[in-house]
Image (spheres, rainbow, N blue to C red):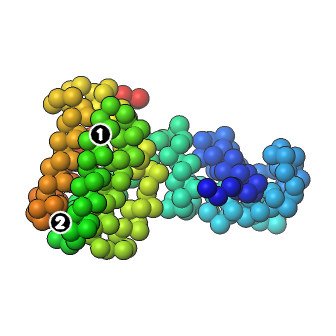
Amino acid sequence: MRVKSRSEEVVNAIGKDIVNGVISPGERLPKVEELSEDYGVSRTVMREALQGLAARKIIRANQRSGTVVLPRDEWQLWDLSVMSWLSESGQRNEKFLLDLTEVRLGLEPDAAALAAKNATEEEKAKITACFERLEQTLDDPKAWAAADYDFHLSIIEATNNQLMAGLLKLLHKGLILSREKTVTSLNEHTELQQEQPTTEILNRHRNLYEAVITGDAEQAKAVMTDMILRVRQLIEATQEQQI
């Protein structure tokens, strides 16, 4: 595992503070000298960190006005670090998860249909192995989330569409958190359950698995659409509970 540099650590620290509202959009950051003292790093490291934040459109440096935090709609939301900060944020987290789910809804049903059409025998074997691992993680939400991601990824890769696969891989952190949130939400909202939550979710995944393996593109797309719509419903239910 690659060790983070000191400047990357500072980027993460300041980035998380901005995402969590500790530092607000429009707010002017202190000078480099003061920031260096606050974070216990050299001025060179702090300048590198600020450059990293500027590259992600989190801040903008100006000789006259200083370094200012930019509004959220200017942030590079597809940057992995920014996505990670948003995923971990306690503020408007459900809104971020809902946005991710809408992206999934626009892509994954078509990905499932393509996988049903294009999957090779080797790819089908991988999908099968991933589904079998999913079956073994029913009682462990975190292990389920990781296995669930691998299962969906195996289907995405079987599309043999590199652009689609690349974009969905980029959502890795957010998707794992989204699925962890979904399992939690199922336990909290019994009115949305038809049987034990993990059993129901597994059955839905089995339907998807069978459609892809048998080459039924229409069914694969329909099942995937239904699964993601349900995820959206659960996240919306979580939002309403917190209001």
Query: Would you name the residue on which mark 1 appears?
Result: 136
- Given residues 116 and 78, the one toward you in this image is 116
Q: Tell me where residue 53 sits by quadrant.
A: bottom right
Classify residue 28 as left or right of residue 165: right
Q: Secondary structure at mark 1?
A: loop
Check whether the beta carbons of the residues at disc 2 and disc 1 lie within 8 A of each other.
no
Q: Position of residue 172 (x, y in %)?
A: 44, 55
Label 1 environment density (alpha carbons within 10 Å; few <14, some 14–19, many ≥20): few
Q: Which mark is residue 116?
A: 2
Q: Position of residue 189 (x, y in %)?
A: 28, 27
Does residue 179 appear in this view?
Answer: yes
Q: Position of residue 238 (x, y in %)?
A: 36, 33
Classify residue 7 as left or right of residue 151: right
- Given residues 71 and 194, the one toward you in this image is 194
Who's the residue at 26% across and 50% down the image? 131
**Residue 32 in the image: above or below residue 192:** below
Who's the residue at 77% across and 51% down the image? 29
- Given residues 160 and 77, the one toward you in this image is 160
Which kind of residue does numbered mark 2 sit on? Ala
Q: Position of residue 69 (x, y in %)?
A: 67, 54
Q: Earlier in the sequence, mark 2 or mark 1?
A: 2
State which quarter of the image contains the C terminus.
Answer: top left
Label 2 environment density (alpha carbons within 10 Å; few <14, some 14–19, many ≥20): many
Does residue 223 appear in this view?
Answer: no
Who's the residue at 56% across and 55% down the image? 82
State which quarter of the image contains the N terminus.
Answer: bottom right
Which kind of residue does numbered mark 1 sit on? Gln
**Residue 78 in the image: above or below residue 87:** below
Q: CA distance from mark 2 to mark 1?
A: 24 Å
Who's the residue at 18% across and 53% down the image? 208
